[in-house]
Image: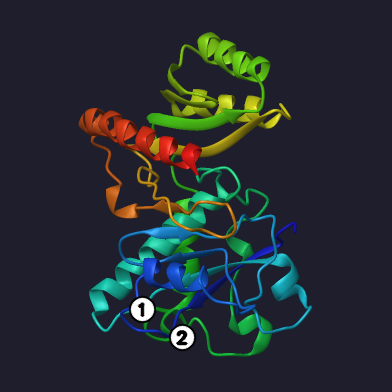
Amino acid sequence: MTAKSFTVHNTANPNATAANHANYECNNNLTTSYHAVVDDKECVFLVPFNEQCWHAGDGSGPGNTTSLAMEVCEFTDTARTTAAIHNAERVIADCMTGKTPVGFRCTQLNGNNIVPHQKWSGKYCPRVILSSYGWDKFVAETKTLIGGAPVADSYAMVFAWAETAEARQRLIDKCVALNCARSYDGPVLYAHASTTKARELEQFIGADAQLHCMWSVATPQSTYNQIGVGDGIGTRPWIVVDPAQVSPDTGKLAAAKAKSEQIETLCNEIQAL
């Protein structure tokens, strides 16, 4: 699927978190699905953006077939609901400006392509954003984030695996050329670099049929400094994003490096599956 719009929903399931909805989405046989769900603390990406989900209620119409879907959690606590909405704005903006992990970007879209679920089926959804928060306000704030000043370069980690020893060596050579710190675990490699170099490394991996990018995680000046591994859909792990971690404090760099050691353990577990 090549997305032509980005559809926003409210969950209409008060006090259930993004993790709650992600668990349910991955463990039922319903056709209803969505690409991402966000709450007041994190966003869970479930389905890559080049795959269709069934969410719009318009059958084989353009809502289901050409629009990305995000569910925004709602809470009886108004402050938590507002925080979830703000996180949704941030994540949509990051998807449209290419700051999200590989597979979850829609840089061909802009703020004019953000639409409510109501557009496709007439359903009053996203009900909280349409009513108490205000749809025009939501779109305007997201557009501001899309058009904001670029985030300063920060620390990033790229996780990849190679099908062959030769491909692994090509990846190592590229890391050396980019002066990326790196570590290995069999076919799995993870590299530490600035986000600028990490994006170049992603492009290199994407152009090599024998190399595969598992995750790309930017930290600490981006929202993407926490990942989680779960059952996912099929063999795909979840990518969990924690917007609460946003901070311009580069003093968190040491903590981010410590996080990489934790993620190395996760890579070991995945390889053992």
Residue shown at 34% from the left, 38% from the top: 221
Please, is residue 95 above or below residue 248 in the view? below
Please name the residue that numbered disc 2 is placed on: 127
Q: How is the image coloured?
A: rainbow
| Image quadrant containing the N terminus | bottom right
Tell whether label 1 touches label 2 (CB within 8 Å): yes
The percent coordinates of residue 212 (x first, y second) are 62, 34
- Spatial distance from mark 2 to mark 1, Cα to Cα? 10 Å
Asked if one can make out residue 31 in the rendered structure from this viewpoint, the answer is: yes
The residue nearer to you, when weighing 81 against 13, is 13
Image location of residue 26, percent across then percent down: 52, 68
Disc 2 versus disc 1: nearer the observer = 1
Reply above or below: 152 against 95.
above
Q: Residues within 10 Å of mark 2 (few under 14, many from 20)?
A: many
Q: Amino acid at mark 1?
A: Glu
For residue 211, which quarter of the picture? top right
Q: Please name the amino acid that badge 2 sits on.
A: Arg
Please state if 69 lies on the left or on the right of 196 as rendered. Answer: right
Sequence-first tag of 2 and 1:
1
Quarter-wise, where is residue 118 in the image? Answer: bottom right
Residue that carries the numbered disc 1 in the rendered image: 74
The residue positioned farthest toward the right in the image shown: 60
Question: Residue 19: horizontal and vertical position, in percent?
Answer: 38, 66
